[in-house]
Image (cartoon, grey):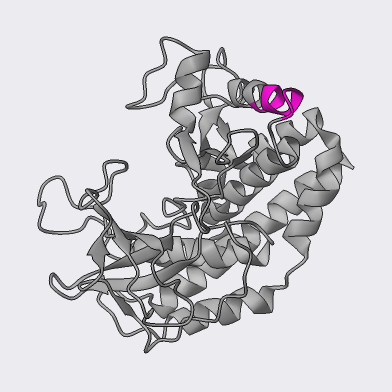
Amino acid sequence: MIDRHITEQQPDQIIDVAEWDFYQDYEVFPSGARNKSLRVCPDPAPYDFCIAGHRYLFKEAIKSAKNPEQPRHPDQYWAEVIAFKIGRLMGLTVPPTFVAIDSTTNEPGVISEWFLNYGPAEERYTDGGDHMQAAIPSYEREKGRQHNLGTILAFSRALAIWGLLSHDWQEYWGLCLCFDALIGNTDRHQENWGVIWSQDEDKARFSPYFDNGTSLGHELFEKKIDMYMNDDGALLHYIDRGQHHMKWSLGHPARMGLVEGVRRFCVKYPSTIPTLTHRLAQWDCGELRQILHHLTKFDIEAPLTTLRAEFVYSLTMKRRELLLKALEELE
């Protein structure tokens, strides 16, 4: 992914993908619970935060199993946009994500920048699930119940020993766990991470932190939100229930708690503590509040309401407080 300055998407700059071409045969993208399609940004690009000719993944809301015509959580797409903004506050590599709509169906959603092949050199991507299956022959990918950090770290260590990895794998996975704990992402399954290989396949890097929409209390209806906003104990209980998708090790019976996963990782790799602490503490509460207020100005189906924006703010700041406290106790 190229590192570039991205101008702020304004409320009157909602992207309409109706006229964007589908990329090759990917009219319907095969991975994930939400309807997805791989599109190509036209040239010229509609706005300066888009890249002409580049691929983008358009994602709609998850449909209800009982009524496929109705989205289960019509405003979930905001979690994807906000997670991108929070990732940027932390200085992480997260695919740029913008509010979008398909005017032919009036479906709101997001477009996320495709995270490889920015230049002429062709890159290859392999899913985390491919590597989990290579390490665990009996691995099943539908539910990913064997998904575990121990196997992932052993694979990461091997890439580094072979001289293939172009960055620090301990920092990468520490920041991944920390980011997911901060936004409450419970869906970092084996298809939501992977490896990007250079054209000659002599260098590799882990993917940006993508597909972050199962987070930020997206599943809570506003009646429930109102309760959590007025009850600190209930909010803490909600946070404590959050779990990473992966277990600590293959033999461990349960998934890791979100904050507990970060704590255990830092006990094992204490050199990552200063980096995680800095990334959590380098931005102030006013920045997040301003971002959320800006997003409530978008006039679109299933908008980000002021109540949900305030809840996301309170939830994120409480999670940050708990993470910083846990890291401080380990120093």
Corner quadrant of residue 91: bottom right
Q: Position of residue 294 (x, y in %)?
A: 49, 84
Q: Is residue 38 above or below residue 171?
A: below
Would residue 144 be counted in the magenta stretch?
no
Evaluate whether residue 230 shows in this view. no
Q: Is residue 298 above or below residue 196?
A: below
Q: Position of residue 319 (x, y in %)?
A: 63, 55
* Magenta highlight range: 156-163
Q: Is residue 215 above or below residue 113?
A: above
Q: Is residue 211 left or right of residue 197?
A: left
Residue at horizontal 48 percent and vertical 61 percent from the top: 228
Residue at horizontal 43 percent and vertical 79 percent from the top: 306
Evaluate whether residue 215 shows in this view. yes
Residue at horizontal 28 percent and vertical 80 percent from the top: 300
The residue positioned farthest toward the bottom in the image shown = 12
- Image quadrant holding the N terminus, namely bottom right
Q: Is residue 278 left or right of residue 155?
A: right
Could you say which is closer to the camera, residue 68 or residue 241? 68
Q: Is residue 70 above or below residue 105?
A: above
Would residue 161 be counted in the magenta stretch?
yes
- Image quadrant holding the C terminus, namely top right
Could you say which is closer to the camera, residue 305 or residue 148? 148
Residue at horizontal 42 percent and vertical 67 percent from the top: 226
Could you say which is closer to the camera, residue 184 or residue 78? 78
The residue positioned farthest toward the right in the image shown = 331
Q: Position of residue 108 (x, y in %)?
A: 26, 70
Q: Position of residue 264 (x, y in %)?
A: 72, 31
Dominant SS of magenta comes to: helix
Q: Is residue 200 left or right of residue 218?
A: right
